[in-house]
């Protein structure tokens, strides 16, 4: 950990824990591993891979990521309870570097109404819990949950006990997104003045008032040297501080902050894109740094200025965040080595047989689409390699739209648990006809909550990427599908969502 340089901030990524906890962002094991690899490429210092005691699936994910990741330290969250700490330590056993992150609420409100404990009992739990964690790991972080609503002196007392028992990082979460920048900075400064200078102060800000990034930056100014962030700001309720915003703020305004970090900013856009693909949530167009409009100039005056000198209206370059300049990456004549090298540079380490599958898909796509970009290649990898073990798979699809005078009709052949089933169905439009036919064959009847089409890359021959969210019997699932034909992509997305719905995550 870069604790030696006083101006180096530690980036603690919690996309796979706090982020994954948010509605609609659930990931399966292989998706978590893929995202963890990307976070490692991005250069985060710590990856909070999950909450091992929360479920066997979480423990498995923490252990798998711990065994997989090369550079970042891998962390598991744990309540201040011995059994939780033991499960976290066990899941981290094979990590090259690891951290135990222990939390306990310290606000009067949480202690009384949630924990049903007196302040003295809470302090004793911190003492015992952190001491036990320090006997399992040489890197222990302690969080005062709901710190921003905790009595200041009680927070300092709790933190001192944590440090005395082996915590090297103290995290001050704004658990409910209540803090204001100036006030939050004063809290951090107050703690800093009363704690061993060798201890790293961390902040973890939620975005309920839209202030998560502002609070994080204010905390840096007050001496915090770790930020807990997520890609795209995903997280509980309104989310957490967005990694890309925090990093680009201290990068673009380095003269103001005087801080350094270990992030490769050119991996910011690929990371946001990968997360968006995995969780099936498109990036909002106006999202800072990574949204589609972040570098788009609509007004004539702005366009003219940017053409003369991009700095007139751009405070950072698209290249600096790794936004591809539409470089063509693959085509009909690409070979296996080129595909392997390109995929490796994108953080995908595939087996030779998997590379063959992707190469075949590249060639099929190249017959339909002239230029193949990074985004196309990534979509192919997701389609060919990482599609979850499917109960339902599309074999053939034929669609007739309504302009023939006949009702929109879909004829499809599905593979259902290895058996071919065919059906023809009608609908109010071609997509509806496809979904109705799929419902008939699978026996599902979900409510379609969201349907969105995106062009993966520009041009009329762009691959369409469809995202759907469906809900059935109180459970919802997001599905994603890509194909040059958007109706076909819709069928794949719908089946992907049904496959997710039929699995317990
Ligand atoms: O928001 C919060 O308080 C948390 C803690 C567990 C760090 O996520
Ligand atoms: Zn949180």
Image: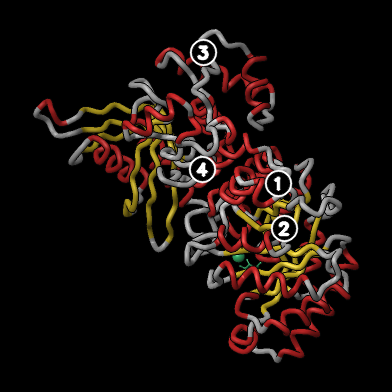
Find the distance from the CA under tag 4 to the CA under tag 2: 21 Å
Ligand number 1: quarter of image: bottom right
- 1 in relation to 101, above or below: above
- Residue where numbered disc 2 is placed: 226
User: Which residue appears at 45% of the width and 47% of the height?
Assistant: 287
Mark 4 / mark 2, whichever is N-terminal: 2
The numbered mark at residue 222 is none
Name the foreground residue: 221 vs 11.
221
Secondary structure of the residue carrying numbered label 4 = loop
Find the distance from the CA under tag 2 to the CA under tag 1: 11 Å
Q: Is the C-beta separation of discs 4 and 3 under 8 Å? A: no
Residue 293 pos. (x, y %) = 41, 39
Residue 141 pos. (x, y %) = 78, 65
- Left or right of residue 294, residue 231 in this image: right
- Residue where numbered disc 4 is placed: 289
- 394 in relation to 39, above or below: above
Mark 2 / mark 3, whichever is N-terminal: 2
**Residue 499 visible at all:** no
- Residue where numbered disc 3 is placed: 331
């Amino acid at each position: 950990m870069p604790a030696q340089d006083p101006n180096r901030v530690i980036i603690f990524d919690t996309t796979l824990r706090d982020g994954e906890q948010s509605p609609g962002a659930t990931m399966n094991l292989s998706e978590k591993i893929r995202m963890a690899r990307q976070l490692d490429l991005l250069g985060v210092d710590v990856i909070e891979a999950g909450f091992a005691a929360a479920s066997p699936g979480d423990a498995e994910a923490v252990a798998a990521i711990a065994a997989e990741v090369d550079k970042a330290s891998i962390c598991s969250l744990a309540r201040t309870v011995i059994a939780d700490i033991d499960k976290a330590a066990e899941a981290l056993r094979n990590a090259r570097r690891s951290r135990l992150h222990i939390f306990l609420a310290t606000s009067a409100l949480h202690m009384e109404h949630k924990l049903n404990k007196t302040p003295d009992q809470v302090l004793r739990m911190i003492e015992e819990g952190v001491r036990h964690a320090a006997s399992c790991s040489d890197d222990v972080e302690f969080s005062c949950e709901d710190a921003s609503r905790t009595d200041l002196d009680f927070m300092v007392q709790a933190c001192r006990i944590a440090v005395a028992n082996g915590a090297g990082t103290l995290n001050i979460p704004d658990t409910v997104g209540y803090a204001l920048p100036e006030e939050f900075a004063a809290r951090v400064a107050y703690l800093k003045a009363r704690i061993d200078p060798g201890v790293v102060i961390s902040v973890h800000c939620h975005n309920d008032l839209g202030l998560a990034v502002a609070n994080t930056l204010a905390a840096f100014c007050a001496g915090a040297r770790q930020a807990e962030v997520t890609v795209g700001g995903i997280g509980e309720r309104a989310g957490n501080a967005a990694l890309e915003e925090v990093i680009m703020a201290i990068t673009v305004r380095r003269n103001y902050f005087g801080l350094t970090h270990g992030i490769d900013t050119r991996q910011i856009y690929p990371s946001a894109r990968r997360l968006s693909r995995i969780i099936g949530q498109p990036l909002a167009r106006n999202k800072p740094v990574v949204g589609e409009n972040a570098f788009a100039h609509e007004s004539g005056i702005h366009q003219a200025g940017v053409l003369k000198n991009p700095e007139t209206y751009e405070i950072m370059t698209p290249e600096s965040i790794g936004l591809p300049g539409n470089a063509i990456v693959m085509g009909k004549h690409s070979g296996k080595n080129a595909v392997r090298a390109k995929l490796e540079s994108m953080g995908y380490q595939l087996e030779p047989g998997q590379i063959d599958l992707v190469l075949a898909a590249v060639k099929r796509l190249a017959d339909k689409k002239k230029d193949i970009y990074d985004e196309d290649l990534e979509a192919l990898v997701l389609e060919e390699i990482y599609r979850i073990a499917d109960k339902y798979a599309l074999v053939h699809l034929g669609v007739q739209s309504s302009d023939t005078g006949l009702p929109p009709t879909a004829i499809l052949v599905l593979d259902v648990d290895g058996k071919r089933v065919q059906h023809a169905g009608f609908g109010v439009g071609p997509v509806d006809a496809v979904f109705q036919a799929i419902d008939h064959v699978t026996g599902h009847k979900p409510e379609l909550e969201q349907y969105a089409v995106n062009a993966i890359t520009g041009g009329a021959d762009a691959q369409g990427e469809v995202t759907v969210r469906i809900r059935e019997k109180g459970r919802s699932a997001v599905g994603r599908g890509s194909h040059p034909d958007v109706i076909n992509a819709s069928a794949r997305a719908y089946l992907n969502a049904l496959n997710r719905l039929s699995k317990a995550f």
